[in-house]
Amino acid sequence: MQVPGRLVNTVGKTVSEVNRAYMAGLIDADGAIIASIESHAEKKFKFRVRVIIKVTQKDQDILIWLKETTQFGRVVKNRTVFDWILRYQRHALIFLEMIKPFIRGKTNQLELALRILSTPVETYQDLISVAQLADTLASFNVRSKNRRKNYVSKIQETVSRND
């Protein structure tokens, strides 16, 4: 039974409304919602789409709390800071749905990421559509502005039109 204001993650752990709101604040303030297209030999069109969620902090305690509360992601040291990184796509979808009602600053990024995660890539055109969403999502990320990749072009250069 689900208590109003609480959400259950994939391992059956309940995450309160207050904690989901706090997590949304972490994403809005110190987080990033990123999409990338990666080469992947086992995929039909040799690419896969990844949505990556990341929070950076100087103190790892809040990131450990985030990992323990959600049971998602991992905490890693990155030079002078720590990152909580969530790469597993099923968990990314659940996490974004958990924080969606509370997100304020990154609503556009969250919506694009949810569209990417919920679009099955069964045809070449599906892959191009998802790559276009990934390009749009990249345009929102401040760090990506000077090193943005055009995923659609990358795929079109690599994938034969006959596939």
Image (cartoon, rainbow, N blue to C red):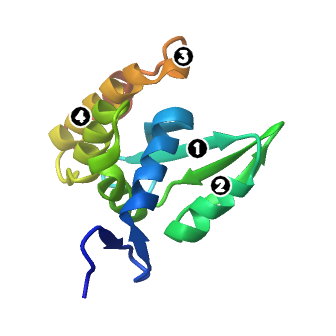
Q: Residue at x 28, y 31 (%)?
A: 108
Give the residue number, with chain letter if any, for mark 1. Answer: 55
- First in sequence, mark 3 or 2: give its number: 2
Nearer to me, 74 or 163: 74
Amino acid bearing label 1: Val
Instruction: Answer whether labels 3 and 4 touch (C-beta < 8 Å).
Output: no
SS of the residue under disc 1: strand
User: Which is more N-terminal, label 4 or label 3?
Assistant: 4
- Residue at the disc numbered 2: 63
> Residue 101, percent across and down?
27, 49
Circle 3 is placed at which residue position? 147
Q: Residue furthest bottom?
A: 1
The nearer-to-camera label among 4 and 1 is 1
Choose top left, top right, bottom left or bottom right for residue 55.
top right
Mark 3 or mark 2, whichever is nearer to me:
2
What is the three-letter code of the residue carrying label 4? Ile
